[in-house]
Amino acid sequence: MPVHHEAIPVLRSKYAAVQAGFGGEQELDKVFESYAFSMKHGIFHDLSLASSTNFQVDTLFITPWYAVLFEVKNIAGELTVTENPPQMIRVLDSGQVSGFKSPIAQLESNCELFQDWLYSRDLSLPVYGAVVLAYASQRIEVFDTKIPVLFPSAVPTFIRKLPTTSPLLDDETFATLLAQLNSGHRFFIPSPICETYSIRRSDIRTGVICPGCGFIGMEKYMGGWRCLSCEGRSRDAHQQAIRDWFLLFGGGMRNKDCREFLRVDRQQTAHRLLASMDLEVEGAKRNRSYTLKFHMESKKRT
């Protein structure tokens, strides 16, 4: 977009928040990667499932005895979680006040949805939950609740203290459950960026981005793409541009859309580029359109 576009400050703020959240989840990931649990278990990160509605779990730790859902937060400032209304208030050192969804209410909802997900498969396990603050420097005040608030280093101790008498699932059933969790995961499909932030299509610069120098507007030639700035070459730089189109605009991409966004002239060229990618195809000839296949495995450790 133009460097002074009015949406850029909002997008930068959102990007920073997403990066912070991802960094927080990585802190918990490190604990699970370095700690060896003695019981049979599975660990799923960024797991998206469907029950009565879609829901997303930052980290799921599951065993034949119980399941634990972890909600990870990495938010700077003084944090206060209220019960009524269910909200998290953040106060920065500058005095700026912001409101967020309550991680307690979000976690309780996810635990209920996951319990329903298990029931629909004739399975019953105790489901626990904990909010994890990514860094010990974070400050939070929480109302009186049974949901524990932990730092990553305390997670293994929390898990070890959970009751393990006789397992509720035999080995075969537990293996089937792990497979069902993996196959049930669906890649998160965000709302199109332009729709979410009220950005006009005409504000988006078209062209294939050079993976070497970031120049927008690589030139198509017989062997791939040529950068007009650094003279770098790529055989598949168009693939990222096509994925970007779906995330920007959503819906189905037609041959014309592909030609306009990638700046290619010939219909046959656009058809060949689209056909080379693993896309869903709908319609035929002039009515043909392409959409992304949003299905992939969650990051899993067993």
Image: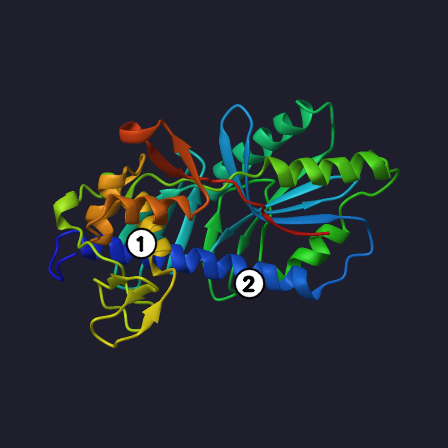
Q: Give the mark nearer the N terminus: 2 vs 1.
A: 2
Mark closer to the observer (2, 1): 1
| Residue 88, picture quadrant | top left
Residue indicated by mark 1: 241
Asked if residue 65 shows in the view, the reply is no
Q: Secondary structure at mark 1?
A: helix
Residue indicated by mark 2: 27
User: At which x and y percent is residue 98?
Assistant: 30, 49
Labelled disc at residue 73: none
Residue type, label 1: Ala
The colour scheme of the drawn protein is rainbow
Residue type, label 2: Glu
Residue 116 located left or right of residue 97: right
Name which residue lies at 26% across and 45% down. Answer: 258
User: At which x and y percent is residue 50?
Assistant: 54, 30
User: At which x and y percent is residue 158?
Assistant: 70, 52
Residue 124 located left or right of residue 116: right
Depth check: give the residue in front, 279 or 102: 279
